[in-house]
Amino acid sequence: MAGDGNRLRRWLKDAAAKAGFAGVYVTDATLPPETGARLNDFVADGRQGDMAWLAETAPRRASPAAMWPEARSAIVLTMNYGPDHDPMDNLAARDRGNVSVYARGRDYHDVIKGRLKQLAGQFAAKSGSNVKVFVDTAPLMEKPLAAKAGAGWQGKHTNLVSRENGSWLFLGTILTSAELAADSAETDHCGTCRKCLDACPTDAFPAPYQLDARRCISYLTIEHKGQIPAEFRAAIGNRIFGCDDCLAVCPWNKYAERAAEAKFHGPGEMPPLASLLALDDAAFRKMFAGGPVRRAGHHRFIRNVLVAVGNSGDAGLVPAAAALLGHDSPLVRGMAVWALRRLLDEDDCQALCSRHAPHEGDATVLAEWG
């Protein structure tokens, strides 16, 4: 039986590599009690913000077996999505919108899930066991599970870090009824380093290994449904979808290589803010078809672009921003006012807003005047 298990593991390693995965790791389908306890503390403090599903699914997230009682083992697969340059360099191009590295190419859910399903089907046929696949779309705590399996460790920024691939890792998981020999968990190699914590523009880490999503730029530009709080707007800079700062500064990235999967390669240059402001819903969907950016939706995306416009210092963007004062979405109208107030003096801005705003006494617009 042990020989069969070893042959299965060798096959799994070879098959995963052929499918484009950087590594494959195995652990039992359980998580220690403190994992669920930390999640409960996170929710109790309200740090999940608009992500209500985290509270609703917390009991099932506490352990893979709580979601699927038949699960005995977890097969964790990693795929590298490393950029070909330091993404921090993009922050200096204030006339362009900066998109998080993970979202510049094809949606990783689509790329990974298809290969994961094929691999899981082959594994099920060889092992005679049942399987379920997950790619960040179910109440499964993939990062703690990956750390337990030895794929890396959760750094002080709460993301997974690998000695081979740094911070640039996508995860996919196969839960199976098969009982497989487990790999050893990885040791935490962060040491005294706190570069990720110090790099955060909005101080989203109350303490090492803790995140307050409500202050995180990735949360604010992707998940948050309301207006972005004024206290964070200047710090967002030109980030229009996500943020890479805490990942990009990790010293372990010196071992990372560019993504082997061409579908994760993004454009060589970030899009100009002027062209992004002109996108209507149809053009937005077409431009970002097949990629994660569509997840924000058109109105929230334009809200984000207007934050970048306000931080650009480019008065040439005033006419395009002013044209959005009459937009249907209060998110867009309000942020257009904020952007214009950053680019114009108070009198000119008030006169411009008065001419363009179609709704007298618009509460959204008035709120931005304070």
Image (cartoon, rainbow, N blue to C red):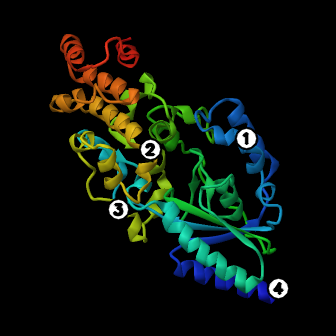
Give the structural element (helix, strand or loop) at label 3: loop
Identified by mark 3, the residue type is Asp
Residue at x 65% of width, y 56% of height: 142
The residues tagged by marks 1 and 3 sit, at their Cα atoms, a distance apart of: 35 Å
Q: Position of residue 41 (x, y in %)?
A: 73, 35
Q: Residues within 10 Å of mark 2 (few under 14, many from 20)?
A: some
Residue closest to the eye, 160 or 342: 342
Residue at x 44% of width, y 23% of height: 231
- Tell me the quarter of the picture where residue 324 sits: top left
Q: Which residue is mark 3?
A: 84
Identified by mark 1, the residue type is Arg
Front: mark 4 or 2: 2
Label 4 with label 2: CB-CB less than 8 Å: no
The first of marks 1 and 3 along the sequence is 1
Give the structural element (helix, strand or loop) at label 4: helix
Residue at x 68% of width, y 52% of height: 139
- Tell me the quarter of the picture where residue 157 sits: top right
Can you say whether 56 is above or below 353 in the image?
below
Identified by mark 2, the residue type is Ala
The residues tagged by marks 1 and 2 sit, at their Cα atoms, a distance apart of: 28 Å
- Tell me the quarter of the picture where residue 21 sits: bottom right
- Tell whether 302 sits left or right of 10: left
The first of marks 3 and 4 along the sequence is 4
Give the structural element (helix, strand or loop) at label 2: helix
Q: Which residue is mark 4?
A: 2
**Which numbered disc covers residue 38?**
1
